[in-house]
Image (cartoon, rainbow, N blue to C red):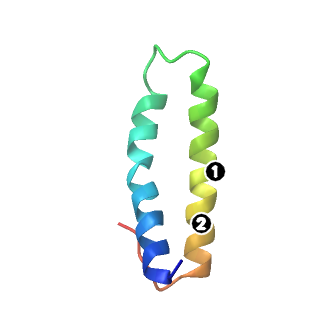
């Protein structure tokens, strides 16, 4: 995978973070809230690692 493809894929994942935040705030998701929180934590970790590896790249 080349750098451009990697950046595009990470950007796509970053764009889905807002959806996860909205999902987490819904009162009717019950036990799935734990999974959503875990997904957010892992996504944030991935985005932090991406920024550390490619500090010149800015995700929108």
Q: Residue 17: x, y in percent?
A: 44, 48
Q: Are marks 1 and 2 in contact (CB under 8 Å)?
A: no
Residue drawn where x is 57% and y is 55% of the image: 44
**Along the viewing direction, whichever of 15 and 48 lies nearer the viewer:** 15
Quadrant of the rendered image containing residue 39: top right
Q: Quadrant of the C terminus?
A: bottom left
Quadrant of the rendered image containing residue 33: top right
- Per the rendering, the mark at residue 57 is none
Residue drawn where x is 50% and y is 18% of the image: 29
Q: Residue 53: x, y in percent?
A: 61, 80
Q: Quadrant of the N terminus?
A: bottom right
Q: Label 1, label 2: how many angstroms apart (C-alpha)?
A: 10 Å
SS for dot 1: helix
Question: Residue furthest toward the front?
Answer: 1
Q: Is residue 46 left or right of residue 19?
A: right
Residue receiving disc 2: 48
Residue drawn where x is 49% and y is 30% of the image: 24
Q: Residue 9: x, y in percent?
A: 45, 65
| Crowd class of label 1 (few under 14; some 14 to 19; many from 20; radius 10 Å) | few
Question: Residue furthest toward the left?
Answer: 60
Residue receiving disc 1: 42
Viewer-side label of 1, 2 = 1
Vertical placement of 48 versus 53: above or below? above
SS for dot 2: helix
| Crowd class of label 2 (few under 14; some 14 to 19; many from 20; radius 10 Å) | few
Vertical placement of 58 versus 19: above or below? below
Q: Earlier in the sequence, mark 1 or mark 2?
A: 1
Vertical placement of 31 versus 15: above or below? above
């Amino acid at each position: 995978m080349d750098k451009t493809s990697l950046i595009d894929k990470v950007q796509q994942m970053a764009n889905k973070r807002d959806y996860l935040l909205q999902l987490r705030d819904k009162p009717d998701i019950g036990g799935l809230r734990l999974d959503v929180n875990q997904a957010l934590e892992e996504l944030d970790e991935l985005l932090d690692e991406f920024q550390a590896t490619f500090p010149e790249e800015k995700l929108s």
